[in-house]
Image: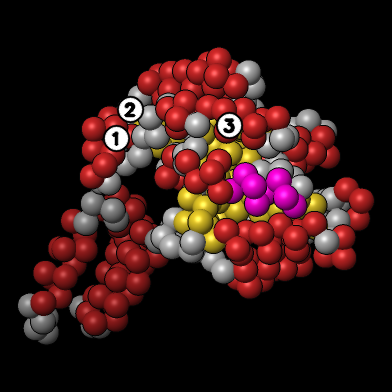
Amino acid sequence: MRICPAIPRFLRTFHNSVEVKNRFAATVTPILRRFEHVISRNVWTVVITLSLLCVAAAWEPSPSYSSPQATKKAFHWPAGKRVAVSLSFDDARLSQIDKGLAVLDSTGVKATFFVNPGGVEERLEGWKRAVAGGHEIANHSVSHPCTGNFPWSFHNALENYTLEQMSQQLDTANAEIQRLLGVHMVTFAYPCGQKFVGRGRQMKSYVPLIAEKFMVGRGYYDEYFNDPAFCDLAQAGGTAFDDMDYIQMVKYISQAAEQGGWVIFVGHEIGEKAHQVTDATALAALCKYLQDPAHGIWVDTVESIGKYILQQRGGQGE
């Protein structure tokens, strides 16, 4: 009986496979001895049988994976409030003092200003008024390092930083603001919302550094509001509201209220609505909305709300 030339080639290829070679020998050899009298009569049956046996010998079940399980914990805002909101502004922009402070103070809303020492020095008396008015002053680094893909940050690129250099940025900013305004800063906002130093295999997160030095680290352009029972306070989500109108702001807060969340709005300039400019008229309307008891909103600084969350968790930030 003639055998198709492809069959021996198939068996040689299968037998020489690195993955199945050893199992092939151990499994097939005794079976061949048992089937010697069949081979001469029905080669095709033997070929198919051996092929199936080889596949069975090489097969291993895929490992099973399971997601880590979490238990949903109950969380209650004080005085029966439905949602918490913090208004925050970055970079110590001049308009925050020149225009924004009057809007906030007229409604009694306290905001968090994430500042750089250089910006504070440009309006030092104004920032002293902000402190006296009960607003929170918080850390935003000394030189605002971001990715070097931004042309303006090319010579101050996170890709060229080390954890030690970033630690120095944070400590220097703390010391300078303490000297200028006499405040101890306990919260931080990641410049550009970026949380890394280095590049490639040498890239490292500096979130643990923030967790070590601050009570809260706020992000930027995050796609979520914070679950107070679950969120990582070292990388709390920040929602840009520079480009929002009043209706959009209220709608976002209402969505968070359905889940009892914490919204941290992030702005920059304050004035007429534009790119990275929070509309002053919309801000004034928002502040009045936040202060209306009928809406069940707790509006306060990042520090105050972060501290409450820590207390409800028994002092555990992680």
Q: Which element is circle 2 on? A: loop
* Residue type at the position of mark 1: Ala
Q: How is the image coloured?
A: secondary structure
Q: Which element is circle 3 on? A: helix
- Asked if labels 3 and 2 touch by Cβ distance under 8 angstroms, the answer is no
Evaluate whether residue 212 shows in this view. Answer: no
The earlier-in-sequence mark between 2 and 3 is 3
- Asked if labels 1 and 2 touch by Cβ distance under 8 angstroms, the answer is yes
**Which portion, as a residue range, is magenta?**
100-107
Q: Residue at x 49, y 61 (%)?
A: 272
* Residue at numbered disc 2: 161
Height in image: 214 above or below 49? Answer: above
* x and y, in percent, of residue 262 in the image: 70, 53
Q: Residue at x 62, y 59 (%)?
A: 283
Height in image: 228 above or below 296? Answer: above
Left or right of 159: which side holds 214? right
* Residue at numbered disc 3: 127
Evaluate whether residue 260 shows in this view. Answer: yes
Mark 1 Cα shell of 10 Å, populated few (<14), some (14-19), many (≥20): some
Q: Which element is circle 1 on? A: loop
* Residue at numbered disc 1: 157
Majority secondary structure in the magenta region: helix
> Along the line of sight, which residue is nearer the eye, 301 or 239?
301
